[in-house]
Image (spheres, rainbow, N blue to C red):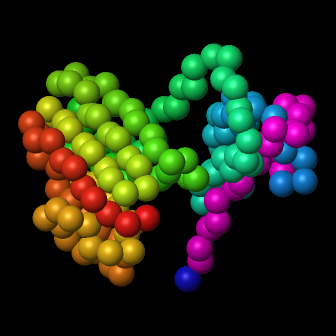
Amino acid sequence: MFYASATDIYVSINGSDTSLGTKEKPLATLHAAIRKVRELRRLNDASIKGGIRIIMGKGFYQLHEPIVLRPEGVQPTSTGYENYTIDPNLGGLAWMEGKVLTANGDISVFCSKKEIKVSSPTGTGKLKIKSKTKPVVKVKEVSKGLYEVTIEKGKDYSVKYSD
């Protein structure tokens, strides 16, 4: 069996935005890393087949403009988000929050290292959770450490889990 590994882009407070974004030559800002991700995706670069991770070194990073991430953690599986999959990945962050705009309302997702909250006025979703223990919610175990929760429209969900 073949497993593709993710491409890593490194950011460090001691980096430079003219660097390559490697572990040895990291970028200096999250904005530069996101630009690099978008460029790799635009070029359909073969190196990103296994995904892309932005790895930020320890330190304080001041943001001078908003960070705009596209809703890649929420993917439609049929037209109009009638069915969709949520596959949150903190990627080293303590928490993240976002909304996906749909014609029938916003799909909202909050994710921390211990809890995932989802609300959606549209469609039926499938929330995928990687957890060391069984999450506290009605859940289906897909494989060891991988669970799925069915998200019904009009309901709010709060799922406790262990990262």
- Name the outermost residue toward the top: 65
- Quadrant that contains the C terminus: bottom left
Residue sitting at 63 percent across and 16 percent down?
A: 65
Left or right: 132 in relation to 156: right
Count of numbered circles on the image: 0
Residue 12 in magenta stretch? yes
- In the foreground, 133 or 141: 133
Residue 19 image point, x, y percent: 90, 38
Tell me where the magenta segment starts and ends, as one range. Answer: 2-22
- In the foreground, 20 or 93: 93
Above or below, 3 against 33 in this view is below
Residue 114 quadrant: bottom left
- In the foreground, 94 or 98: 94
- In the foreground, 62 or 123: 62
Above or below, 106 against 129 in this view is above
Above or below, 4 against 20 in this view is below
Residue 18 in magenta stretch? yes
Q: Can residue 15 be seen in this view?
A: yes
Principal secondary structure, stretch drawn in magenta:
loop
Residue sitting at 25 percent across and 27 percent down?
A: 106
Left or right: 80 in relation to 69: left
- Quadrant that contains the N terminus: bottom right
Residue sitting at 51 percent across and 48 percent down?
A: 94
